[in-house]
């Protein structure tokens, strides 16, 4: 089973492209793009389970320089 999520990220001013490039290199991230709107970067990530997804977000994404806030939205298939 694979758990997927979108991570919406706010960054310091002018850091969106740099943050997107850095996040794209993280194992488990399948997409990272800088965008316009209330969030600066949108990331799609996947892991084997919810615990691993949480560790990915907390230990590898939120620790990157330039990130000020994240919102993780798990993908749900009904």
Image (cartoon, grey):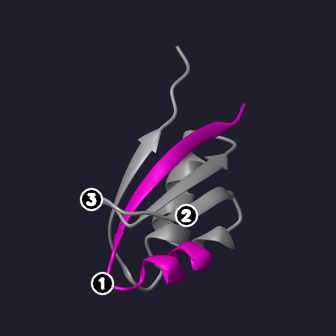
User: Image quadrant for the N terminus?
Assistant: top right
The location of residue 35, given as percent across then percent down, is 44, 63
Q: Is residue 63 above or below residue 40?
A: below
Of residues 47 and 34, the one nearer the viewer is 34
Q: CA distance from mark 3 to mark 2?
A: 14 Å
Mark 2: secondary structure: strand
Judging by the rendered image, the residue that carries numbered circle 3 is 38
Dot 2 or dot 1, earlier in sequence: 1
- Name the residue at 59% across, 79% down: 22
State the SS at label 3.
loop
Q: Is residue 16 depicted above or below 78 in this figure?
A: below
Residue 58, image x, y percentages:
46, 64
Identify the residue at horizontal 53%, vertical 44% (top origin).
5
Image coords of residue 45 (percent x, y): 60, 52
Q: Which residues are magenta?
A: 1-22
Does residue 2 show up magenta in the picture?
yes
Circle 1 sits in a helix, a strand or a loop, which is it?
loop
Q: Is residue 63 above or below residue 73?
A: below
Residue 76 falls left or right of residue 3: left
Residue under label 1: 13
Circle on res. 33: 2
Q: Residues within 10 Å of mark 2 (few under 14, many from 20)?
A: some
Residue at image position (46%, 54%) is 7
Answer with mark 1 or mark 3, whichever residue precedes in sequence.
Answer: 1
């Amino acid at each position: 089973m694979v758990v997927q999520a979108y991570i919406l990220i706010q960054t310091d001013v002018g850091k969106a492209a740099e943050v997107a490039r850095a996040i794209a290199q993280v194992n488990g991230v399948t997409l990272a793009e800088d965008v316009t709107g209330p969030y600066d970067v949108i990331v799609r990530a996947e892991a084997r389970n919810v615990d691993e997804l949480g560790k990915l977000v907390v230990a590898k994404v939120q620790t990157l320089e330039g990130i000020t806030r994240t919102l993780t939205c798990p993908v749900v298939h009904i």
